[in-house]
DNA sequence: AGCACGCCGACT
DNA sequence: GTCGGCGTGCTC
């Protein structure tokens, strides 16, 4: 009998040892008993130091004859677990596609629907069982709900599901699969700057080199990718293309398939589990030449991987914001280095980390300075809200510009990163404003459904008729959301065809695409929306872009606010102007003298980067320092803070490391949890890593630890 | 995270 | 009485 260390999909910062008759290779899946359950685990190693004081339980079944995870993948995952200080078990499972996490091959997922009896029930039946009522309602609305969707609704629903099944109201059924057909498109002719970029990368095939492909929207980065992919494929290699979450448009995949043939697989959140597993296995075997995917695709096994591309490398969606908080772009670079292959990072507004690497010579800078022949950069102008009158959030110059575009039969886009009608409901008499009772936040007024909603926890309630504190009958709706902008627009431009795009109007991908078709068919004159409009979609007839509230990004408490605002505005500006029709971007602000506007109105990334880097150097933030953020949250008010204070005192003498103060989180209470955080920084990555390892090993000694939810975020994207 | 156990409050 | 909500403890 030999001890086997197994990684399990549980958020425990420990691994578990079992016994088996013979050694097993890392990467092999096994079935093991865990408490009263049976789980699928992944063999980590044959431990030199198996737990001594516990009787090991036996492995029940060995699922794979050959390891499911390749050696190269295991090395990447071990590094990632180590670097992000996350339990290896969870990290290993993050790399597996949903279809392979549990049973054998790519089995269809379990799904549930209401029985005829279940359909016939009145909603009042579940007067006492709230969870059952919610679940019954959700399945009724969805028709069929897969196990994954069920789990996504939150923990603790399994007993309610079983209760419904026992009552004969819900039954198991099969989930449907989706299929996305390929289209065709012609190959492109490259400009000299594109050809030079291709040549530089191609010269590095077969060894590690990192390239920062710096080019504005419309400069043709995609053609460069296509050319490189074609070359890799011609040489029998495989390639991995990472794209941001919203960036994975059907158009991109269609272009890739048209140029490269039916060897392109797509991995994203909307992918059915079976499809995901199929692509994953095909890529591992070398049959799938190109895998295009979002964040988690960085873990795809590829036997002949010869090139990695990260498109829009600055995009925040590459950083996972919960659980295993890895950065897919950073892991992509590590993987490329480790494998000895080139990696291309593309962006119009590179992250300051990547830009500094390029300036220091760690990355090769490849610039695409030209926009295509039919595309000129738009003019960007500020509107001073302190001087211009405004109606419902729309300033006079913006209204004027809208009128002229409409008269010319052109389209306009308006951006506002705030859903709903008004962000605050205020009593003019006693200054009461509608608070969320679970969060330190104001409730947003939503007109469509006549409700107040918390954007942080999702709680909804009715709009009070009068002030609950002083009884004043007329409550004011203060500030603007997309609904109010839409209302104001309809009043100002009664003849315009107006559409609004945000999570409230276009929850589904299907609805979103239907709306995009309407815009392309010029059935819409003005489109109002949140940031979800800005990425990946081209609107050729749009010549005016209005940014309603840019100021949220100017005084952000977060060190990355400047970078985010700059990239969002450039992204947005890229939507405007085409075909000899010059574009105009109007940015409404209360702070027209803010230093960020100078480079921004010229769309001058390099000037912005100089300025931002000086700032970061002065304040010792990335890329001039490396950070880790310990977050904690607890039900009781001071528990999280006390836990972090104890952790802080527990810390070994930090010579190379700067330990911050324990601070309440920006939203100190969210969904009923009190939240606090502790920032650790160091100018040396290695020093921070070594120090974290020692520190985190001692966290379980903290008496409050079992009652606190805590996590460590290495290289946090933001301090929120 | 699950899943048990165990204690409290509302309805048959 | 008993069902279901919810806090606490454990998993090699």
Image (cartoon, coloured by chain):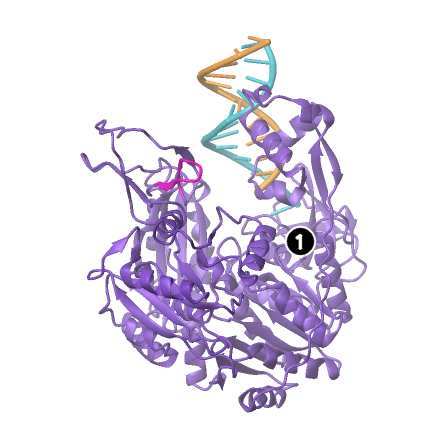
Chain colours: A purple, B orange, C cyan
Task: Please indicate whether residue A352 sits to the left or right of residue A181 in the image.
Answer: left
Check the picture and name the quadrant holding the C terminus of chain A: bottom left
Q: Relative to residue A461, is residue A594 depicted above or below?
A: below
Which of the two residues, A240 or A139, is positioned nearer the viewer here? A139
Residue A329, horizontal then vertical, whole percent: 53, 70
At x 33%, y 51%, the residue is A666
Could you tell me which secondary element the residue under label 1 belongs to?
strand
Name which quarter of the figure residue A311 lies in.
Answer: bottom right
Q: Is residue A68 visible?
A: no
Please, which chain is the residue tagged with disc 1 on? Answer: A
Q: Report the number of numbered marks.
A: 1
Residue C10, horizontal then vertical, whole percent: 57, 38
Q: Which residue is mark 1?
A: A6
Does residue A445 belong to the magenta stretch? yes
Which of the two residues, A409 or A220, is positioned nearer the viewer here? A409
Which residue is at the far right? A65
State the extent of the magenta-drawn residues as a range.
A443-454
Residue A286, horizontal then vertical, whole percent: 76, 71
Task: Please indicate whether residue A693 sits to the left or right of residue A237 in the image.
Answer: left
Name which quarter of the figure residue A222 lies in.
Answer: bottom right
- Quick one: label 1, few (<14), some, or many (20+) residues within 10 Å? many
Q: Relative to residue A211, is residue A129 depicted above or below?
A: above
Residue A708, horizontal then vertical, whole percent: 43, 43
Which of the two residues, A351 or A631, is positioned nearer the viewer here? A351
Q: Relative to residue A502, is residue A73 depicted above or below?
A: below
Q: Is residue A106 visible?
A: yes
At x 54%, y 20%, the residue is A128
Does residue A54 belong to the magenta stretch? no
Name which quarter of the figure residue A279 lies in.
Answer: bottom right
């Amino acid at each position: 009998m030999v001890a086997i260390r197994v990684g399990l999909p549980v958020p425990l910062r420990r691994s578990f040892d079992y016994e088996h008759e013979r050694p097993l290779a890392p990467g092999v899946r096994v079935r093991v008993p865990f408490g009263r359950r049976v789980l699928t685990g992944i063999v980590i190693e044959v431990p030199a130091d198996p737990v001594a004081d516990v009787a090991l339980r036996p492995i029940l079944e060995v699922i794979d004859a050959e390891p499911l995870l390749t050696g190269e993948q295991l090395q990447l995952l071990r590094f990632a677990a180590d670097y992000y200080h996350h339990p290896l078990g969870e990290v290993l499972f993050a790399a597996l596609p949903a279809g392979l996490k549990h049973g054998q091959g790519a089995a269809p997922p379990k799904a549930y629907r209401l029985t005829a009896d279940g359909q016939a029930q009145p909603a009042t039946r579940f007067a006492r069982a709230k969870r059952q009522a919610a679940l019954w309602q959700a399945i009724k609305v969805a028709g069929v709900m897969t196990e994954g969707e069920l789990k996504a609704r939150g923990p603790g629903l399994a007993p309610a599901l079983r209760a419904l099944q026992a009552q004969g109201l819900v039954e198991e059924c099969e989930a449907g699969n989706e299929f996305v057909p390929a289209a065709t498109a012609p190959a492109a002719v490259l400009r000299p700057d594109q050809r030079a970029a291709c040549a530089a990368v191609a010269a590095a095939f077969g060894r590690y080199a990192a390239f920062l492909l710096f080019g504005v929207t419309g400069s043709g980065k995609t053609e460069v990718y296509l050319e490189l992919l074609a070359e890799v494929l011609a040489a029998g290699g495989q390639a991995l293309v990472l794209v941001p979450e919203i960036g994975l448009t059907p158009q991109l995949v269609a272009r890739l398939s048209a140029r490269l043939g039916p060897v392109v697989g797509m991995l994203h959140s909307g992918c059915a589990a079976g499809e995901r597993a199929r692509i994953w296995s095909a890529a591992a075997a070398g049959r799938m030449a190109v895998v295009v995917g979002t964040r988690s695709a960085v873990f795809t096994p590829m036997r002949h991987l010869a090139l990695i591309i990260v498109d829009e490398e600055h995009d925040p969606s590459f950083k996972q914001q919960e659980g295993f908080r890895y950065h897919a772009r950073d892991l992509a670079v590590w993987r490329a280095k480790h494998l000895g292959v080139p990696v291309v990072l593309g962006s119009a507004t590179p992250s300051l980390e990547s830009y500094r690497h390029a300036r220091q010579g760690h990355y090769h800078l490849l610039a695409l300075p030209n926009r295509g022949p039919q595309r000129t950069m738009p003019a960007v102008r500020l509107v001073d809200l302190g001087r211009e009158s405004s109606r419902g959030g729309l300033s006079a110059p913006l209204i004027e510009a809208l009128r002229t575009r409409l008269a010319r039969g052109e389209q306009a886009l308006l951006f506002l990163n705030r859903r709903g009608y008004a962000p605050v409901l205020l009593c003019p008499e006693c200054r009461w404003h509608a608070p969320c009772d679970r969060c330190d936040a104001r409730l947003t007024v939503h007109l469509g459904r006549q409700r107040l909603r918390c954007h942080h926890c999702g709680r909804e309630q009715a709009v009070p008729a009068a002030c609950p504190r002083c009884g004043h009958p007329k409550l004011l709706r203060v500030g603007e959301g997309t609904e109010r902008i839409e209302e104001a627009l309809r009043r100002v431009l009664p003849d315009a065809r107006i559409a609004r795009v945000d999570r409230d109007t276009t929850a589904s991908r299907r609805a979103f695409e239907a709306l995009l078709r309407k815009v392309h068919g010029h059935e819409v004159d003005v489109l109002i929306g949140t940031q979800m409009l800005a990425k990946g979609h081209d609107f050729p007839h749009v010549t005016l872009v209005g940014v309603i509230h840019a100021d949220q990004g100017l005084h952000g408490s977060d060190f990355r606010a400047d970078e985010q605002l700059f990239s969002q505005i450039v992204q947005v500006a890229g939507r405007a102007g085409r075909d000899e029709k010059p574009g105009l971007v109007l940015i409404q602000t209360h702070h027209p003298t803010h230093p960020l506007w100078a480079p921004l109105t010229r769309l001058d990334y390099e000037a912005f980067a100089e300025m931002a880097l000086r700032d970061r150097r002065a304040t010792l933030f990335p890329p001039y320092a490396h950070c880790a953020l310990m977050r904690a949250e607890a039900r009781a008010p001071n528990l999280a803070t006390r836990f972090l204070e104890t952790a802080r005192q527990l810390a070994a003498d930090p010579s190379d490391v700067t330990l911050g103060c324990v601070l309440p989180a920006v939203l100190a209470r969210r969904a009923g949890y009190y939240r606090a955080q502790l920032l650790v920084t160091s100018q040396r990555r290695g020093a921070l890593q070594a120090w974290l390892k020692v520190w985190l090993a001692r966290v379980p000694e903290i008496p409050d630890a079992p009652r606190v939810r805590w996590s460590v975020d290495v290289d946090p994207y933001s301090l929120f």
